[in-house]
Structure formats: structure tokens, C-alpha cells
Image (cartoon, helix red, strand yellow):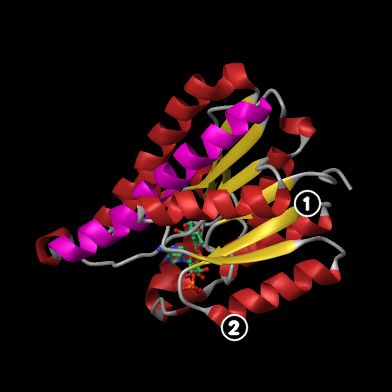
Amino acid sequence: MVLSDRTAIVTGASRGIGRAIALSLAKAGADVVVNYARNDTAAAEVADLIRAEGRRALLFKADVAAPEAAEALIKAAQSEFGRVDILVNNAGINRDNLVLRMKDEDWDAVLSVNLKGAFNCARAAARAMVKNQYGRIINISSVVGLTGNFGQANYAAAKAGLLGLTKALAKELCSRNITVNAVAPGFINTEMTAGLPEKVTEKLLAQIPMKRFGEPEDVAGLVVFLATDAAAYITGQTIAADGGMTCM
Ligand code: NAP
């Protein structure tokens, strides 16, 4: 139980990668706040599974893009568990379109949730972590933030922005024993990728040396590692979990 006595907040933990991260952190011994935006039933199921591991779980519905909602999320974690040790900024959306057709509202929505949401939660959590002189902040970026992608200017900009945020936060917070790192998943089997046309999937598979999409657990294992004391000297880094996609 490498994370026993640790508490974690995972944003967007009702489904996909966030769900796997929340469950893996609980399996490693952490109590977990399950944040989500809409899907009450799926989030409640994740909380039940965490409790079945013998850990505490708190459900907290909040739109991370709203600063006051992010503040309330961190406050709820503090009052329920007494402290905030680990924050995983995982909540994300995509609204894909070519730049020439992209609507302002689709640009704004993706930047608001993926980038501002992470800033909102990190700022609120860092205030709590500074008091405890301990913290782990892990931002879920994407290989698309490293390489760009057709039809994803908003998403690529948000995910690349997260890498800058990660490095700046790492430098500001390292003297307080708080590390900040980013994880860049490749293409992972979740609802976000379920609707990809077969031709696009085939093209993507051709770019992945391991010749398969990842599973949410492939990302969760890396996040758990970054949350442990084994990763105490790692900060400001971006680590890809992408089946070799970005090593080409
Ligand atoms: P997903 O299956 O679509 O799940 C998204 C999660 O985010 C859900 O729990 C959703 O909650 C939550 N969420 C959405 N908007 C939110 C908001 N405003 N406030 C709080 N929670 C919100 O996505 P995923 O594929 O697991 O992706 C998780 C993260 O990994 C995202 O940041 C994504 O960009 C990144 N990523 C994914 C892939 C991939 O291939 N899947 C690759 C690279 C990076 P509800 O259920 O309540 O809607």
C-alpha cells in the first residue's frame, strides 16, 4: 500500500482514464475524491468500487472550468479527508473541427475545461498543499499536445498549454515539496475515441509501434507511480504512455 494515508482528487473520474486512475490510486491505498460533471450513476459506481477496496470515497459533482466550483471541490476534499496530497487534473473534452470551420464556442469550451480547469484546481489545491509541505500534481495532457493533430487545434493548444503550466507550477512549488508532472497518453480506448471512423483508426494504428490503442489502466499505472515517493525527484516532466507513438 504505497499510498496508504494519502488522499487524492481525480477530476473527470466517472469514466475512461479518470475512472481507472481513481481505482488504481485506491488500490494503492489512497482515499479518493471522485469529481465529475454530469454522469451521476457512473460516478457513484466508481465511488462504490473505491469503498469496496476499503478506502474512503467522496463524490463531488463540479464543473472544473468554473473557478468557484474548483475551489469548492478542493474545500470538500479538505473537510472530508483533512488534507489534499494528490491532485490529478484529468477532466477533459474535445470539440474537433478544422480551423477554418471551428466555432468560437468550441475553442472556448475546450480551453476552459482542459486548460483553465487544470489551473483552477491546481491553484486551489496548491494552497492546501503548501500548508502541508507536501503534494503531487499530475496533469493529463496528450500526445496531441506534443505533435498537433488535424481537426484538433483547440485540443492541441489546450494540451500543449498544460505542459507549460506543468513546468511553471513545478518551478514555483518545488521548494514546498510539491512535484508537478504531466502525462501524455497516446490513443486510449475510452468514449472519447470510440467514435473515430475506421479509416482514421487504421491510420493511427499505423503510427503506433505497439499496433494497439492503450487501455485506461496503461495510463493509470504511470499516474500512480508519479504519485508515490519513488517519484520524489521527478518534477516538471512530461511522460508519454503511447505505445511508442512519439518515439518515431
Ligand atoms: P472521457 O471518457 O470522455 O471522460 C471524460 C471525463 O471528464 C468524464 O468523467 C467527464 O464527466 C469528465 N468531465 C468532462 N467535462 C468536465 C468538467 N467540465 N468538469 C469536470 N469533469 C468533466 O475521456 P477520457 O478519454 O477518459 O479522457 C480523460 C483525459 O485524458 C482527458 O483530459 C483527455 O483529454 C485525456 N486524453 C485522452 C486520450 C484518449 O485517447 N482517450 C488521449 C490523450 C489524452 P461526466 O462523465 O460526468 O461527463
Which of pointers 1 and 2 lies earlier in the amino acid sequence? 1
Q: How crowded is mark 1: few (under 14 residues within 10 Å), some or many (20 or more)?
A: many
Q: Residue at x 39, y 76 (%)?
A: 199
- The amino acid pointed to by label 2 is Thr
- The amino acid pointed to by label 1 is Ala
Q: Decide which of 161, 186 is in the foreground and name it.
A: 161
Q: Which residue is drawn at 85% across and 43% down?
A: 2
Q: Do the residues labelled 1 and 2 touch (CB within 8 Å)?
A: no
Instruction: Find numbered disc 1 in the image and state the secondary structure of the residue it sits on.
Output: loop
Q: In which quarter of the image is residue 83?
A: top right
Do we see residue 75 in this rendering?
A: yes
| Disc 1 from disc 2: Cα separation | 22 Å
Chief secondary structure of the magenta span?
helix
* Residue where numbered disc 2 is placed: 41
Q: Where is residue 226 in the image (x, y as percent from the top left)?
A: 68, 39
Q: Residue at x 39, y 52 (%)?
A: 68
Instruction: Find numbered disc 2 in the image and state the secondary structure of the residue it sits on.
Output: helix
Q: Position of residue 132 (x, y in %)?
A: 67, 29
Q: Give the range drawn in magenta.
A: 104-133
**Magenta-colored stretch includes residue 122:** yes
Q: Which residue lies furthest to the left in this view?
A: 100
Q: Decide which of 64, 206 is in the foreground and name it.
A: 64
